[in-house]
Amino acid sequence: MNWLLFANMVALLIFGVFAVYAACWMREETALATKWKDQVYWILLGLVIFFATSLIDYKWIKYLGLPLYLAATGLLIFTTFKGTEINGTRAWLDVGPMLIQTSQLAIAGGVILLALVLCTLHRVHPVLRNPFMRLLVTGIVTMIPFSFVLLQGDFGSALVWIPVAGAMVLIGNIPFRYLIVIILTVTMFLPFAFFFGLKDYQKKRITTQIEMLQGKKVNVLAEAYSAHNNLLAIGSGGWSGKGFKNPETINNKGFISPDTAINDFIFPVFSEEFGFRGSLLVIGGFMLLLLQLIYVAFYSRDMMGRLLVVGIVGLLFAHIYQNVGMNLLIMPITGIPLPFISYGGTFMVVLLFLMGLSQSVWIHRIDPEAKKVRPQLKIEHLD
């Protein structure tokens, strides 16, 4: 077990519980006040799955790729039309006492299946050795869940698929000229996607962000309400912050939506209370985590393990960059959680499953068969 990686992850999880508590402790009259306890329960469940996954050789887990992808995509399609709608996004499946976000299950299955496609598809048939064919299959695997997540209105979760697939294709022995053509093609069609693919409120988020960056006047009581208050909370925290459970924070006064303060907008909450140094510590923790995962990928025993870990790195980086970026006007505001910090049941369990998968790659980095046939070196002692 890579204990440094595990300790880094646990440190972020502990800080996340305190961050969720800091975001909701003052709302005693609502169910939000106990969300930090629910977060602890989800973490404990996720840790059980984490250890179970890490101890199983990932060469067996890879066979779950296609069944998990098909089952999760089926649930995703069902949720798109019959799911529960929250804040204009139909992304949750109501299962008794809890809500399941099926898009998170789909991306977990997608990472495993994409790794399987990129490292084994060329062995199935000689035609599939062509890089274009492997790239085509990768695009189909990515575009199906990507399209349905967009239909649900969850623009943030849909965007995550792009860096995940891009990072895995970059490592998956696809010639660089193919990647350049894809990037140029996507760039060419971006204006059409903006004008014809996005809904009016999604366009407004992007244009509002650009106008705020240009210093133009915006309506801070309407479309710029969240962006303005989030920036105000981050900036007012200063170097050391306003202190834990300070009743004078912008969050405590209700200017950050209670429903999103515990997940999508949790970065402004702890930035205001713990200041720039607290935010820097968390971002540094994420940086250390990503570097360790890249180290694990480097020492993987085969391409399958390397692709799995690189997909997880792409997933984590996309969530971190989008969540922090949208609160700093680097990215448009989209509904996306901050890994290990934001409240979320399905996302937390899926995240710890994927981290267990990366630990499995590290634990089983030495091939047992290769170890058996490795020649033993004889060392002669010279007098």
Image (cartoon, rainbow, N blue to C red):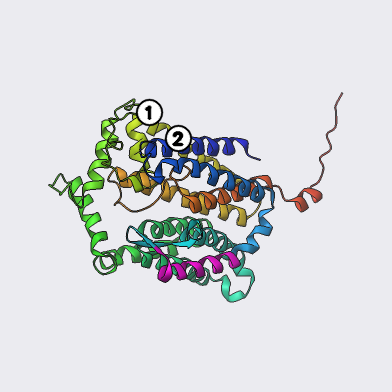
Q: Which residue is mark 2?
A: 18
Res 244 label:
1
SS at badge 2? helix
Q: Is residue 201 magenta?
A: no
| Residue 202 position within the rendered picture, expressed as x and y whole percent measured from the top left | 27, 60
**Residue at (33%, 39%) from the top-left corner?**
268
Q: Where, by quadrant of the figure, is residue 58 drawn?
A: bottom right
Name the residue type under label 1. Answer: Phe
Q: Are marks 2 and 1 in contact (CB under 8 Å)?
A: yes
**Residue at (38%, 28%) from the top-left corner?**
244
**Residue at (24%, 37%) from the top-left corner?**
232
Name the residue type under label 2. Answer: Phe
Q: Up-down: is 147 above or below 54?
A: below
Point out the stretch of residues depicted in magenta: 66-84
| Residue 305 position within the rendered picture, expressed as x and y whole percent measured from the top left | 61, 53
The quadrant of the picture occupied by the C terminus is top right
Furthest-front residue in this view:
29
